[in-house]
Image (spheres, helix red, strand yellow):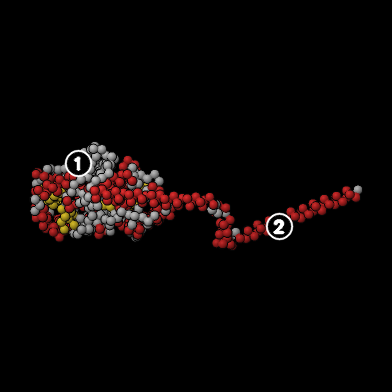
Amino acid sequence: MASKNSCACYCVVVTLASCLLLVAAAVTVLTVHVAVGRVLSPSGGAAAAAVHHSLTPASVPLPSSRHAHARELVKRRVQARRLEAGLAEARASIRRASRTRNCTPDGGGGAAFVPRGAVYRDAYAFHQSYIEMEKRFKVWAYREGEPPVVQKGIGAVDGTGGIEGHLIAELEGGGGGGRHRARHPGEAHAFFLPISVANIVSYIHRRDMIEYWEPQLRLVAGYVDGLAANYPFWNRSRGADHLFVSCHEWAPILSAAKPELRANAIRVMCNADMSDGFDPATDVALPVVGHAGTGGRESPQGLPASERTVLAFFAGGVAHGGGGAVREALLARWEGRDDRVVVYGRLPAGLDHGELMGRARFCLCPTGGHEGAAVASRRVVAAITAGCVPVLVAADDSYSPPFSDVLDWPRFSVAVLAERVDAIKDILAGISDRRYAVLRRRVLRVRRHFRLNRPAKRFDVVNMVIHSIWIRRLNLSLPY
């Protein structure tokens, strides 16, 4: 009986001890929770937030994630070095072709076009460069953004910007039947910024805006900043391997939204006037071309040289709002004053501009002033299409003709300073028939490079622009 009572007492003591331990544990847990609650309370401020963040398991990088990040950095570095090594090989191949006057076969077959002749600065270097471009060049088009800020395809730009839409369609589609489309950013030599200046101006700009440029500039800067924050590519090259395409007259202004965009990026613009900030070393002159051709046929080239009775032709007014000093001088001296130098401010009814160009030996292409370089580009292309020798009339040498890094313009055109506008008739009449025949034959030879095709064809205007972009990227050696 005594033993039973002892056991009972022992059980009560054990049970009581267990209860005390549970109470102590509960108090301890409660104390911990109260302490943590004080740390994470709103009164804790920034320190509380930092502590809370440090306690979040997801915020603590696991060893595996750190290793994955390191592997990704190594992978990007290897990809970049591989790209630069390929570009170095391309440079060596081009130099070798220029030196040996021999190119690597391009696989185009016996009927493939081969650039040769005096119209090229170095036909062998150009041909080899084009082959290397087709073999290697990859472009990645950023997919962020929506219209109207971002250009989407060929139908978004009309008028003089038609060539812009065609080029963007090629870049977004990869160009060359997809040949230049990068499968991922890691294999891209260049990165396309699909900003549409024409759309931004059309949708955002209002003439009565107090801040005339600021909204558009902020929009462009914000788009670039967004890409720079989400991708490493802009920051690693400071924009030097990025493309900006626009045929709008405001393109030089809006590209200044970011200093690196203006100074470093490859800007492809119809306004190729160096007085407006165009830099031939990094920028590309985009020719203003009309409608796309079909069926591979050449456009009508006008009358043969023997039947061209007009010495020189020009028709075009001076844009409202000033500028166009070269045009003003040309019109003041020659409009309605000579039957061999035919100049109109406004083309009379019943006369056809294209027909008159087809009857002229020389076509005057004045630059300068409002939209000057873009207008000159349009007239240069129209002249070449019509088989008319272009005469570049400028106040200085600030106009950079399209594809000047490949084509030797003095071999198939005539340059006249604006100060010699009064002597244009004497200058052009002084060119012998033999010399004129050589100039015109060369004009016909370069026509294929200014022809717009859909889809694009080898050595046509779109692929020549892409080659100009390739050259700028090829000349850029990034320190990866």
Q: Residue 299 bears which disc, if any? A: 1
Tell which of 71 and 428 is nearer to you. Answer: 71
The reply to whether callout 2 and callout 1 are in contact (CB within 8 Å) is no
Q: Quadrant of residue 30?
A: bottom right
* Lower sequence index among marks 2 and 1: 2
Q: Position of residue 178 (x, y in %)?
A: 34, 42
Q: Type of residue at label 2? A: Val
Q: Type of residue at label 1? A: Ser
Which residue is most to the front?
A: 100
34 to 412, vertically: above or below: below
* Residue displayed at 39% across by 44% down: 183
* Residue displayed at 23% across by 52% down: 404
Instruction: Check disc 2 and report the residue beneath it.
Output: 27
- Work out how far the residue at label 2 is from the one at label 1, CA to CA, in angstroms: 94 Å
Res 417 seen here: yes
Left-right relation of 64 to 210: right
* Residue displayed at 33% across by 47% down: 137
* Residue displayed at 25% across by 54% down: 272
Q: Mark 1: which secondary structure?
A: loop
Left-right relation of 416 to 127: left
Q: Position of residue 357 (x, y in %)?
A: 15, 46
Q: Position of residue 195 (x, y in %)?
A: 35, 51
Q: Mark 2: which secondary structure?
A: helix
46 to 95, vertically: above or below: below
